[in-house]
Image (cartoon, helix red, strand yellow):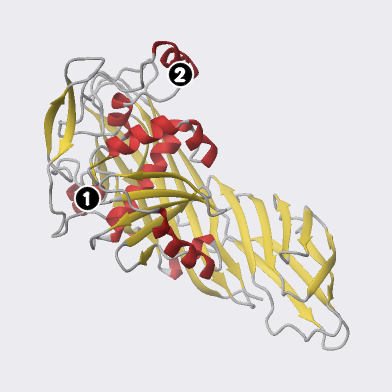
Amino acid sequence: MLRGTISGGRENPWWSYRARYRPDSARSLKCRCSRKKKVFRGYYTMIHSLFLINTSGDIFLEKHWKSVISRSVCDYFFEAQEKALSVENVPPVIPTPHHYLINIYREKIFFVSVIQTEVPPLFVIEFLHRVAEMFQDYFGDCSEASIKDNVVIVYELLEEMLDNGFPLATESNILKELIKPPTILRSMVNTITGSSNLGDTLPTGQLSTIPWRRAGVKYTNNEAYFDVVEEIDAILDKSGTTVFAEIQGVIDSCVKLSGMPDLTLSFMNPRLLDDVSFHPCVRFKRWESERVLSFIPPDGNFQLMSYHVNAQNLVAIPVYVKQNISFFETGSSGRLDITVGPKQTMGKTVEAVVVTAHMPKVVLSANLTATQGTYAYDPVTKILVWDIGKINPQKLPILKGSLSLQSGAPKPEENPSLMIDFKIQQLAISGLKVNRLDMFGEKYKPFKGVKYLTKAGKFQVRT
């Protein structure tokens, strides 16, 4: 991650700024911000083009900052996509004879950037995630339909976020002063008057030492909410022993406070966190010395920090799976028996449980019985999905029955792995707990709240 993006509320920003004036049809002068050309860690960091590609392989939007690069450069991406087993396995960096393609996958959309010089890949990946998050913040979701419906605002955002290929304004508060978010009323007024969503004044925070927060914020109800969301990635062998486990967590924040509050967030057990990365508002030196988060927050929604817990002795597995999938040597049949139950959930309920199995190609059909939930087997994709829902510890869900195989086909060499999906409300499986939140610089008392959520990431059970 970039140090400029993860630390130093009082440190210098990623790049320096200067003001420039240009004539405008609606006003004689418009003051905008532009970034001086700068070398980032010894590289000229420059993004030449951006392509948005859906899962069908259609390029539905493209943007060029330097020269126009032909769409044919995406053929290298399509080749890599065909070789990958799933969309998550597409390589994030794809070298070509004259370019580098750096991509992310968000909300069934590939964001593919074209780079002509060698740059730190995480720099570009971080920026692409910022673009996707900005679309979600502006339009409610980052889908192909919402991007097409707001294509003018999309191009305006990309023009402001990247200046001549260099990141410029990536904070939501600054962009919302430059480009007003779309509303039905504003769209009607713009259609009638011919005006645009561009703001008339320079954002108040653009040139300040706190560019992520606008000045003069006022609220009738002052409140600050923090969501601790953890994803557990794990691989369990046939006996239930943990082969691999790690936790990836984020703290999402919604802060609506008047004035210029200075917050301090402390944890009861911060030492268990590894590989932390922060929003630029966090004072990194304070974290290094005291293990507390000290920051002046942006206004509205933002991700305060992300972290990993990868010590396997600290990762509790919240569910267990008893399974027996067998295929007979004689006869075209097999048996399946799966039981799912809670484990180390601190008394919390496991809900939204879904079991997915990619069956061998020789499996034609499944005749199963579920004591809870519903199951479906697709004979074309060979995917078995068992939607359990909420687990009752007093009566565990069981799925069992027979499998029909192709006549004369050899016995499958390997049994399918099970992918488990679940959610546990009001539990951080790592044991992380927020101790207290203190506010300085303002006299009012805000309403504060913390919510915890644990969910499955890539949770695999081998059979």
Horizontal relation, residue 413 to residue 50: left or right: right
Contact flag, marks 1 and 2 (Cβ < 8 Å): no
Residue 368, given in percent of the width and then of the height, sits at 84, 64
Residue type (three-letter) at the residue carrying disc 1: Glu
| Res 120 quadrant in image | bottom left
Residue drawn at x 88%, y 84% is 331
Badge 2 is on which residue?
187
Image spot of residue 462 (x, y percent): 62, 74
Q: Marks 1 and 2: which is nearer the front?
A: 2
Q: In this view, does 418 lie above or below 152?
A: below
Task: From the viewer's perspective, tell me whether residue 210 is left or right of residue 224.
Answer: left
Residue 137 coordinates in the image, percent (x, y): 42, 34
Q: In which quarter of the image is the N terminus?
A: bottom left
> On screen, 1 above or below 335?
above
For label 2, count other residues whose C-alpha is less than 10 Å away and answer few (under 14), some (14-19) or many (20+): some
Residue at point 29%, 65% (across, down)? 98
Left or right: 389 as drawn, with respect to 82: right
**Compared to 11, does 317 lie above or below?**
below
Give residue 290's mark.
1
Residue at the image position 34 percent from the left and 67 percent from the top: 95
Q: Which of marks 1 and 2 is nearer the N terminus?
A: 2
